[in-house]
Image (tube, rainbow, N blue to C red):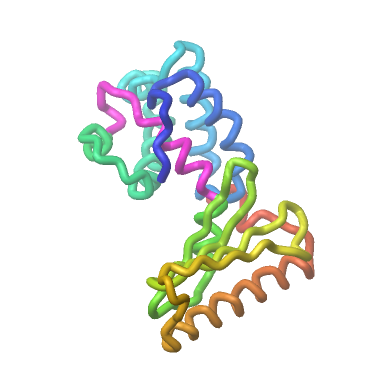
Amino acid sequence: MPKYKSSAKDKGVIIELIKEIPHYLPYLNLTKEQHIAINTYLTLSLHQGEAMKMAEFKSYSPEMAANFGEFYEAARPFMNSDSLFEMIFSTESDYAPNLANLLAYVKEARARRIKESSDVIYEHATYHVDEDENGDITHRLNTLELIIKIKEQTGDYKEAFISLENKVPEGFVKTEKLEDVANFFAYMNKYFSEYLRRELDPVGEAFHD
């Protein structure tokens, strides 16, 4: 997960979270109560100019603090943070959550959901999905010998940009690895075919009860 240069409590991070959460809402596992709690927490934090300490938010509303804490705990394993405060996160703590890491988690929600929707098992490769700053999705297959990238054209599933990078000078790939390559392209064909048959809809529901 990328680290944001701005402070975890920076006002700019709070503003960006307020803007990005509605955009990625269809891909976040948020209950209605958690969504209300997060919006309230961010609004209060914006009013005071920095991220609110969890103990202060709990004093404001124990119920909303608990709902916010549930979502943050679910997101924490994806944050890859080595901060001691992150490891002992609590709604009663006298410190604020790392909103920069939470922002990165939110902005990776769509790519994460796309990756999770794949049921293909690779023996000698790994499958990754990334979303860039322009909102373009790139599917990537990594092996020891090569990297294959398929980038979606925003709003147009009739074309895709494909690139292949050889990681060995000779460019040879062991034939046993070809099954992974074939499975990757077969899945990509299925993936794009599904979108060509219908308009793009968010994956899953916006809220989960």
Instruction: Please determine whether, in this image, residue 50 is positioned above or below residue 101.
Output: above
Name the foreground residue: 182 vs 10: 182
Residue furthest front as drawn? 170
Q: Residue at x 57, y 51 (%)?
A: 110
Q: Is residue 183 left or right of residue 100?
A: right
Q: Quadrant of residue 15?
A: top right
72 and 20: which one is in front? 20
Q: Please state the horizontal and vertical placement of residue 55, each as a whole percent of the image.
A: 30, 22
In this rendered view, identify the residue nearer to me: 79 or 186: 186
Position of residue 197 in the picture relative to residue 27 (left or right): right
Q: Is residue 203 above or below residue 141?
A: above
Residue occupying image coordinates x 55% and y 41%: 32
Residue 39 colored magenta? no
Q: Is residue 1 above or below residue 57?
A: below
Closer-to-camera residue (165/185): 165
Whole-percent x, y for residue 14 in the image: 49, 24
Query: Is residue 36 visible in this depiction of the protein?
Result: yes
Residue 192 shown left or right of residue 133 in the figure: right
* Magenta stretch in the rendered image: 90-109
Q: Position of residue 17 (x, y in %)?
A: 53, 31
- Whether 95 is among the magenta residues is yes
Q: Image point 55% across, 67% down: which residue? A: 164
Decide if residue 67 is in sight here. Answer: no
Percent position of residue 72, x then y:
39, 40
Residue at horizontal 64%, vertical 50%?
Answer: 136
